[in-house]
Image (cartoon, grey):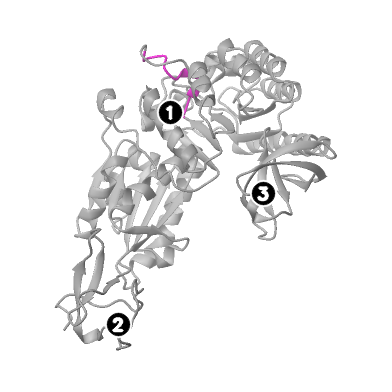
Amino acid sequence: MIKAGYSLPALILFSEPLFDSGGTAGPDPDSLVKAVDGKGKNCVVSEKYPQQRLPVNTSKKLYIETFGCQMNVNDSETMVTLLKDLDYETTDSAAKADLILLNTCCIRAKAEQKVYSELGRLKSLKNGGRKVLLGVGGCIAQQEGEKLLKRVPYLDLVFGTHSLHLLPDMVRAAEKGERLTRNDFLDPESRVDLFPRKDTAGGVARFVNVIQGCDNFCSYCIVPYVRGREISRRSSEILQEILELSEAGVKEVTLLGQNVNSYGMKSPEEPSFAELLHMVAAIDGIERIRFTTSHPKDMSQALIDCFAQLPKLCSHIHLPAQSGSDKVLKAMNRGYTRREYLERIAALKKARPDITVTGDMIVGFPGETEEDYNETRSLMEEVGYADLFSFVFSARPETAAAKLHDDLTRKEKQERLDRLQKRQHIMTRERNNALQGTIQEVLVEGVSRRGDQLFGRTSGNRIVNITADHSLIGKIVTVRIAEAFQNSLLGELV
């Protein structure tokens, strides 16, 4: 008989034949009992046929919704790895999940509002009669902590940016009915030992975290308050992870951090970021290297030289200017002038003439005049951004800019943003149109959203869709750009 408290799943996958060598029918369901196989996995064993072990699908479903930057994407991948030991596997449907995690962003008020809206939508799943755990991680969790549990009474766990390593224990506790919050900041000595590792299996392109936190304290930015101060990961761990990724078939790595350019500056025993790039480039199997995000203040000549010296380093840089006005840049505490920013852009284009530049801009910063705004517009033209992520200024708690007098109306700010984005829309299309007819090297990453094509990216980070055999996934192929669109290119194999 089946032991008390144990129920058979609706579907059992059989690891051995259902008939013995004599052709006798296999295990009688009434003779099955719970057991553990030699690898520690749950299974069921027939008392009548003890040599037959039938694996049980005991996995629980995990749904993660990620808001915000690539660092959060990276953290979400880490959550998946951490929860595998608790038998969680991912699902693309919140309605099917046993555990739902929102990995949150609070860089702007709108991003924060989206999270609370999603929490409201998920309430119906919590009240649907099936046990579902709901957790919030990331920057809002770090910022709000215990207040989140009080504001959202059906929330089970809240874990901040420094508490990712505690997630498995917190989920175990939540499964037993406990409601927990962990959002303490860790000291640097503890943090350096807790850079999380992700599962190395699968994928053509992967993120690798090299630095956490930020010391720049730009007046508008909440990152230092929710991610903590800057700390560099040990280079030996970075290189080992990339070596393992390479051995697993990964072809491209993106070195990730809030400000990768300052890697190693507070750790004399570690290489500079430029030196780290040279070390990564020496790893066999890695064919492309990217990095993000860079702060113009910390863009050294040695790093710029890497674009001339390292063929594996892709022809793309994301270098946020945030404004084209010296007055506004000073108020933002950015640490450079318009002239210094443009000098770095010129040096990058000299080192790699085909480099693609993308960036970030904020409009409507407190005190921004129409003249300041026009200086931002002229900087856009001078740089020639391929893409620009642009936003209306959003006052964030604890930041210096939140205390500044702001005499612009929301309507004025939005009008400036609309004009800027309209112009960038045209510039992006012109840049894409200029690639039509050119020959490009594309790393094929997978199946496109349409499902009938493959997609990949050029060295300059432009998305290219091609019709090709799936065997090309993971390979760099030569294509001719046949047609250009607003957000992608259509390529033909050469």
Q: Residue at x 36, y 15 (%)?
A: 267
Q: Circle 3 sits in a helix, a strand or a loop, which is it?
A: strand
In the picture, the disc for residue 239 is 1
Q: Residue at x 25, y 86 (%)?
A: 28
Choose mark 1 or mark 3, whichever is in front.
Answer: 1
Residue 363 at least partly seen: no
Q: Tag 3: residue type?
A: Phe
Task: Name the residue at the right extreme.
Answer: 437
Q: Circle 2 sits in a helix, a strand or a loop, which is it?
A: loop
Residue 439 screen position, x and y as percent: 80, 37
Residue situated in front as seen by the camera: 455 or 31 = 31
Judge the density around disc 1: few (<14), some (14-19), many (≥20) Cα neighbours within 10 Å.
some
**Which image quarter: residue 418?**
top right
Disc 1 to disc 3, C-alpha distance: 28 Å
**Magenta stretch: includes residue 217:** no
In the picture, the disc for residue 43 is none
- Lower position in the chain sequence, tag 1 or tag 3: 1
Judge the density around disc 2: few (<14), some (14-19), many (≥20) Cα neighbours within 10 Å.
few
Residue 50 screen position, x and y as percent: 20, 76
Residue bearing mark 2: 20
